Image (spheres, grey):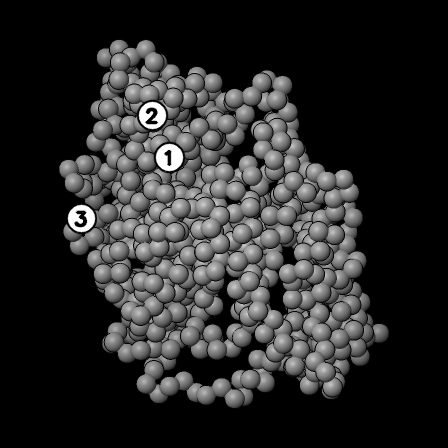
């Protein structure tokens, strides 16, 4: 594994001698033009499944197959949509990207049309109401049915024509407002002109850089969000200077506030249209949290746990400020003080840190050694490992892409992971996990019946499926998962040698591999609940749990050649110099609470003010006072993409911390605990009640209720920093 990723000569997966194929082993996807043809064939094939479902009420036994066939229909469409999504972000060829965009839009349009197909909705409703069918559905099958039912109802298919038109109008307005809000939230406020003399006392190197950029009159133009602004916030000794900068960066802009508040109002109107009291109530119905009051119970419990810790850290900053400005009593910490005194505190305390224990070795983790550690970890706790696999000509989108088989010690190959690790021009930055194909049961597809009485056109195989993508378990045949991991690591070179990962990059890689293994292990009968296709406030649990493994000395030891020496990597050492993690967590709690307030019925109140509500919240549960004349909430871009669900990451962090403490903290390489986690959580994907999964894996029946009390319990667990 190390050789594969750490040596430039091995920077691409070796191709096999087998005959050429198409992208992702799809035999008919060898050129950009083929993407358009694939989309057309898929739509034609999907229409046959739609017609079969619509005639289900006319044929004996077909109603019982409706959920299965809706899931197959979804799998057909997502097989193109999900692959197109990956190609749009990763393929270096513009023609492929354009073709993927066309296919993506074409398929999504068709899927939106299906969501308004009254006939499909009526058939599914009949299935759920039929006393001979509804009660016989498995939990997994019922969850799939409810997913489709909610998709139909999100399109207001059950409403009158007038209400449906109003729904479409509001949805369009929300889309426009959301884009405008995202644009405005990313645009910095006006620059600030600062004279160099006002920055006296800053580090010499920084001042020298500033002087080079300053005008002849000694004036420095500081753009909000720039490197210069960050340096002033972190190192400018004069509080008045830092305050001026912070005020300029957070000044209230009435136009931006108006955009946000109209977005919140439109969401509230949309919720009211479908019979919900608030947008939060509408969104949370299908999440683990279920209701807004449950989320608030979780956040309040979490805040009670973390706020005292955050106040302790504020006190550290206050004492640091007291020494700096030579006052008799500890002074208050304001928003513009935090970065400056956090930097001073870290410098002061680092002088007294003891050196690492001599029994620990310091290692430089390469990409290869990190993947080796991941494979070794999976072997020890899951009985699974990663194995390099050759690729066929035409199978991958760039020579730098590697293909890994995920191998189970009993079942053999259970899925494939394509990893595209190195940064390159035109490729999206950051890290991401994509599912190109989900697992699902296929031996009971009964695809011949899709063609009804048309015997001449009956088929026995879908010609565009991925070659060799089926596996067997317990006498059943399953479509095996295919996932992609994108990163933007520096490429190894002959001159620089293997790529050394930073602490953040190690954590990121472990995080994304948590998603990937969820995709690989989450084998279900249905595509729509496979792997990471689960509740959005549950999906981050496996990935966040992997971050705990990334900071464990016994796991980090797997990166060293000996694999048996407790190791302290830069990640472990860095934790010593991050003394304000509780303050960061408290900030996230404040933001998640604000998100709930903004998507509650209060938005409909006369005179609602997002600025006033934020100030009220900050003064009641915050640890630094609010500042009049500012409106930070207009920079909270996640209010659009995560509306009413921003709590999810905190929620999963709390659960992951509990699972870590219960199962792995004493021995992260414990196979028994790994099998327990795999058996109780990962294998079900979204096909089992997540509350039951969590309750069983930690052994707490009270949690399995999934009610307000359960949310409070999770909040009281707190988050390991």
Front in this rendered view, residue 435 or 441: 441
Using the numbered discs, state the Cα–Cα distance from disc 2 to disc 3 in whole angstroms: 33 Å
Q: Residue 134 bears which disc, if any?
A: 2
Using the numbered discs, state the Cα–Cα distance from disc 1 to disc 3 in whole angstroms: 27 Å
Identify whether 537 is placed above or below 491: above
Which of discs 2 and 3 lies nearer the camera? The answer is: 2
Residue 674 is situated, as x and y percent measured from the top left of the image, at 27, 59
Q: Residue at x 39, y 61 (%)?
A: 658
Residue 580 is situated, as x and y percent measured from the top left of the image, at 56, 72
Return the disc, 1 or 2, that comes first in the chain's sequence: 2
Which of discs 1 and 2 lies nearer the camera? The answer is: 2
Answer whether residue 542 is visible to the viewer in this image: yes
Residue 73 is situated, as x and y percent measured from the top left of the image, at 36, 27
> In the image, is 324 to the left or to the right of 556?
right
Q: Which residue is mark 1?
A: 143
What quarter of the picture does the N terminus occupy? bottom left
Q: Residue 411 bears which disc, if any?
A: 3
Return the disc, 1 or 3, that comes first in the chain's sequence: 1
SS class, disc 2? helix
Return the disc, 2 or 3, that comes first in the chain's sequence: 2
Front in this rendered view, residue 298 or 628: 298
């Amino acid at each position: 594994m190390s050789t594969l990723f750490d040596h430039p000569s091995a920077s691409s997966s070796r191709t096999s001698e087998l005959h050429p194929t198409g992208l992702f082993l799809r035999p008919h996807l060898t050129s950009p033009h083929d993407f358009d043809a694939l989309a057309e064939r898929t739509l034609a094939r999907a229409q046959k499944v739609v017609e079969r479902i619509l005639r289900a009420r006319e044929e004996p036994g077909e109603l019982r197959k409706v959920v299965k066939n809706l899931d197959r229909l979804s799998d057909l469409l997502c097989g193109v949509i999900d692959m197109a999504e990956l190609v749009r972000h990763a393929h270096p060829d513009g023609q492929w990207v354009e073709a993927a965009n066309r296919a993506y839009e074409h398929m999504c349009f068709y899927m939106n049309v299906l969501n308004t197909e009254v006939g499909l909705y009526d058939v599914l409703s009949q299935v759920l109401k039929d006393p001979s069918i509804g009660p016989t559905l498995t939990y997994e099958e019922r969850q799939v049915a409810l997913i489709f039912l909610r998709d139909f109802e999100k399109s207001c298919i059950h409403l009158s024509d007038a209400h449906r038109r109003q729904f479409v109008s509001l949805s369009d307005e929300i889309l426009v407002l959301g884009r405008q809000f995202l644009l405005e939230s990313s645009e910095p406020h006006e620059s600030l002109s600062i004279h160099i003399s006002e920055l006296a006392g800053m580090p010499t190197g920084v001042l020298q850089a500033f002087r080079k950029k300053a005008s002849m009159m000694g004036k420095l133009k500081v753009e909000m969000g720039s490197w210069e602004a960050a340096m002033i916030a972190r190192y400018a000794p004069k509080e008045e200077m830092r305050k001026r900068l912070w005020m300029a960066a957070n000044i209230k802009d009435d136009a931006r506030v108006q955009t946000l508040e109209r977005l919140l109002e439109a969401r509230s109107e949309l919720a009211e249209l479908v019979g919900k009291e608030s947008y939060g109530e509408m969104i949370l119905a299908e999440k683990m949290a279920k209701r807004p009051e449950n989320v608030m119970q979780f956040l309040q419990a979490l805040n009670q746990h973390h706020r005292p810790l955050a106040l302790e850290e504020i006190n550290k900053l206050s004492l640091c400020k007291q020494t700096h400005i030579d006052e008799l009593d500890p002074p208050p910490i304001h928003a513009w003080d935090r970065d400056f005194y956090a930097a001073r505190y870290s410098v002061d305390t680092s002088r007294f840190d003891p050196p690492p224990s001599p029994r620990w070795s310091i290692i430089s983790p390469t990409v290869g050694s990190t993947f080796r550690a991941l494979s070794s970890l999976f072997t020890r706790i899951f009985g699974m490992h990663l194995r390099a696999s050759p690729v066929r000509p035409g199978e991958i989108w760039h020579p730098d892409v590697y293909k890994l088989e995920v191998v189970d010690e009993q079942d053999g190959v259970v899925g494939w992971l394509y990893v595209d690790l190195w940064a390159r021009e035109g490729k999206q930055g950051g890290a991401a996990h994509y599912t190109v194909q989900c697992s699902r049961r296929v031996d009971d597809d009964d695809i011949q019946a899709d063609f009804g009485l048309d015997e001449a056109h009956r088929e026995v195989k879908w010609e565009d499926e991925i070659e060799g993508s089926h596996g067997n378990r317990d006498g059943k045949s399953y479509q095996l998962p295919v996932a992609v991991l994108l990163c933007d690591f520096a490429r190894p070179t002959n001159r620089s040698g293997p790529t050394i990962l930073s602490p953040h990059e190690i954590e990121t890689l472990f995080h994304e591999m948590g998603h990937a293994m969820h995709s690989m292990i989450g084998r279900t009968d249905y595509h729509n609940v496979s792997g990471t296709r689960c509740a959005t406030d549950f999906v981050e649990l496996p990935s966040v749990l992997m971050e705990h493994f990334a900071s464990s000395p016994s796991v980090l030891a797997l990166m060293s050649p000996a694999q048996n020496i407790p190791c302290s990597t830069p990640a472990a050492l860095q934790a010593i110099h991050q003394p304000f993690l509780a303050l960061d967590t408290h900030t996230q709690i404040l933001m998640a609470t604000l998100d709930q307030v903004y998507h509650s019925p209060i938005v409909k109140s006369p005179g609602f003010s997002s600025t006033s509500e934020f100030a009220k919240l900050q003064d009641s549960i915050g640890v630094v006072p609010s500042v009049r004349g500012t409106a930070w909430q207009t920079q909270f871009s996640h209010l659009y993409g995560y509306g009413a669900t921003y709590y999810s990451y905190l929620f999963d962090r709390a659960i992951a911390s509990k699972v870590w403490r219960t199962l792995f903290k004493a021995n992260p390489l414990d196979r028994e605990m790994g099998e327990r986690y795999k058996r109780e959580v990962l294998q079900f994907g979204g096909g089992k009640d997540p509350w039951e999964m969590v309750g069983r894996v930690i052994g707490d029946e009270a949690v399995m209720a999934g009610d307000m009390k359960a949310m409070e319990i999770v909040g009281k667990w707190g988050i390991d920093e």
